[in-house]
Amino acid sequence: MATTLDPRTTVPSDGAAVPVPRRKRRRKMLALKRLRDGLIVLFLVLTAIFLLGAIVGDPAESLAPPEATQEQVDQIRHNLGVDRPLVTQAGDYYSGLVRGDLGESLVIARNQPAFPLVMERLPSTVRLTIAGLLFSFLLGVVPGIVAGVRPGSIVDRAGTFVATAGVSFPYFWFGQILILVVAVQLKWVSVLPGNDVSAYLLPGLTLGIHHGGRLFQLVRSATLDELDKSYVTVAQSKGLGYYAVVLRHIMRNIGVTLATMVGWEYARMWGGTVFLIEFTFAWPGIGKLVTEAAQRHDFHVVQAGVVVAGVFVVVANLLVDVMSAAIDKRVEVG
């Protein structure tokens, strides 16, 4: 007698029907789709960088000595291959990306591969972004929850003021103010880069003020929205204390929103914020290297820095989806 199986089950070797984890397969497929979308975005960014470098800058003029003649400049341009048609340059550019060859530094470290130069600076930038994320959490998430639970309190008013200032004023301006007041006038900390914890205070605080301001506003709003929902009243009517409701229910319900917002802010750091902070504080990271390379038309170094930053943005966005799905099983990745 034939047996009709549910389409969500399969028959293993022992003949017993077991459910197929379709939901897990769906999440894997959506995660791959999100990764694909991120790679497409990275490809578009790299294309924009190539076009800007080919149209705006001329590395031959940067490499040529001041007394060089036009013939000598043209010869340097020919040696670099930038006098070829744009389509030919693009073909070499993309083939190099596929091979992992991002070219050699033309100015900053002549004849040195650009990618290793960027990777040498990567640990400093990663540590700085982690410090900025910690300050963002302390200045944005923690006060945002308190302000949402206790609207109108001192924490709410002070946090709203700091958050508004943090998202309104240029963050590099905040960094310069901190340098002048805290380091130069008060002499509390040094602004010299190093592995000492104090070296991360001012640049990390500058990142925290800007990104923490956005987190404060969003977390406060999310907490207030949860407090207005009926399940809070039901939980309190059953005898559950106010802070128990906050810890057991509200924190759990805003967990997905919180993970998403923190992940987005970390991706935004790699999208350009940390680069300007490194330049402001003369931090020996990727941002300072790429900024100097852009000023001196060292295109291959700029390209390598954009590749690394783009990869971090893609990975951060993918981790946001994964964390959201882990916190709330109802959330689909992607």
Image (tube, rainbow, N blue to C red):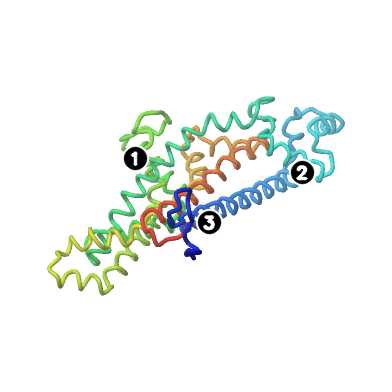
Q: Secondary structure at mark 3?
A: helix
At label 2, the amino acid type is: Ala
User: Please, what secondary structure does the residue beneath circle 1 have?
Assistant: helix
Q: Nearer the viewer, residue 330 or 294?
A: 330
Where is residue 29? Give x, y as percent: 54, 54
Q: Outermost residue toward the right?
A: 71
Mark 1, residue position: 182
Can you tell which of label 1 and label 2 is closer to the viewer?
A: 2
Q: Earlier in the sequence, mark 1 or mark 2?
A: 2
- Which secondary structure lies at badge 2? helix
Left-right relation of 269 to 298: left
Sequence order check: which comes first, mark 1 or mark 3? 3
Q: Mark 2 — residue? A: 90
Give percent across and percent down for residue 268.
49, 51
Residue at x 66% of width, y 36% of height: 296
Q: Nearer the viewer, mark 1 or mark 3?
A: 3
Seen as rendered, the residue at the extreme front is 1
Marker count (numbered): 3
Identify which amino acid the numbered label 1 is placed on.
Answer: Val
* Amino acid at pointer 3: Leu
Residue 250 vertical placement versus 99 (above, below): below
Whichever of callouts 2 and 3 sits on the residue coming sooner in the sequence is 3
Residue mark closest to the camera, 2 vs 3: 3
Coordinates of residue 326 in the picture (x, y in percent): 38, 53
**Label 3: how many Cα within 10 Å (few below 14, some 14–19, many 20+):** some
